[in-house]
Amino acid sequence: MIRGAVLGSPISHSLSPTLHNGAFNFLGIDGRYEAIDVPSGSLSHFFAEQAENFDYLSLTMPLKEEAFSLDIEFDSLSTRIGSANTLYRRDGVWRGCSTDGSGFIAAVQGEGLTSFSQALILGAGGTARAIAGAGDGVIPSISVLGRTSTRRDALSRCVVNSTFDYLAWSDDCDLSPFDLVVNTTPAGAADLLAENLNPIVNALLFDVIYKPWPTVLAERWADRSGRVINGKELLLWQGLDQLDLVLDEPLDRSKLAPYLREILARQ
């Protein structure tokens, strides 16, 4: 049996068990995946006590940066961006990486969108780092709107081939220069930004939140004729990348992805 879990806090809202158990069912794999509440500061203790019971672990807030407290091997990308959402065991050795960035790119491409000139990322946590790293060299200009200047250097290290700017958070920030806005903040944190949107919005909003949905920002964005992608798409594609790693082979996604998308849509 393959055993996996998503760790974080709070975690009861997570649809990761729905996704991964659905994939096991579709593929005919004997597997079990659960959600476990692991608060900030307790990942190392959990891993030391429970790692032997699992084949892989997904990490969500607030553990994506805390992962680097573990004495395991991380790939070069996750090390550079300082964010890991995946821990997996292969040949008895635990490794860490991030599939948030690759999942983000796949989700956007799945909507038929391949080119942006200026991106703004709302928030400066682990998911923001992964998306900044994924956009590096693909999107010419990447800006981050963050609440604390202490995260500026960590974000700047994620972007080496594109131009980068770190902006101090402002609820009346002008979003009109950007053709892609990615919201990585917790639910409710970007609500006041929605109050200051222009009457017509031309950019794409990718909101990584999927519960509660729609967010205030996503709802107002759509009301102003803007295109919106919700977090279920990121959940789907980063989860498929995780399963590729766990099974040590690329999955045929032509039928699996639509099947899982339908399951998630019902939640």
Image (cartoon, rainbow, N blue to C red):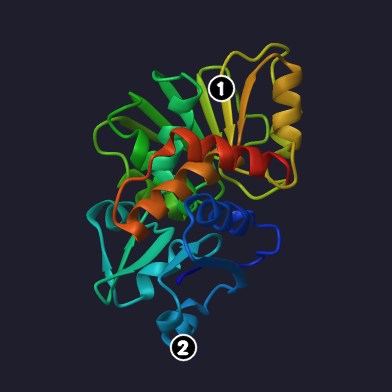
> Is 203 positioned to the left or the right of 100 in the image?
right
Residue 64 in the image, given as x and y percentages of width and height: 46, 61
CA gap between label 1 and label 2 equals 43 Å
Say left or right for 48 vs 77. right
Which quadrant is home to the N terminus?
bottom left
Query: Residue flagged by tag 2: what amino acid is it?
Result: Glu
Residue at mark 1: 204
Helix or strand or loop: what does disc 2 sit on? helix
Q: Which residue is drawn at 41% across and 54% down?
A: 243
Q: Can residue 169 be seen in this view?
A: no
Q: Nearer the viewer, residue 157 or 66?
A: 66
Taking the view exactly as shown, the residue that stands out farthest to the bottom is: 49
Q: Name the residue under label 2.
A: 49
User: Which mark lies nearer to you, 1 or 2?
Assistant: 2
Instruction: Specify whether residue 134 is in view.
Output: yes
Q: In the rendered image, which quarter is residue 206 located in?
A: top right
Q: Tell me the crowding category of disc 1: few under 14, some 14 to 19, or many 20 or more residues within 10 angstroms, Cα based.
A: many
Q: Position of residue 143 (x, y in %)?
A: 44, 33
Residue type beneath disc 1: Leu
Q: Which residue is drawn at 44% across and 75% down?
A: 54
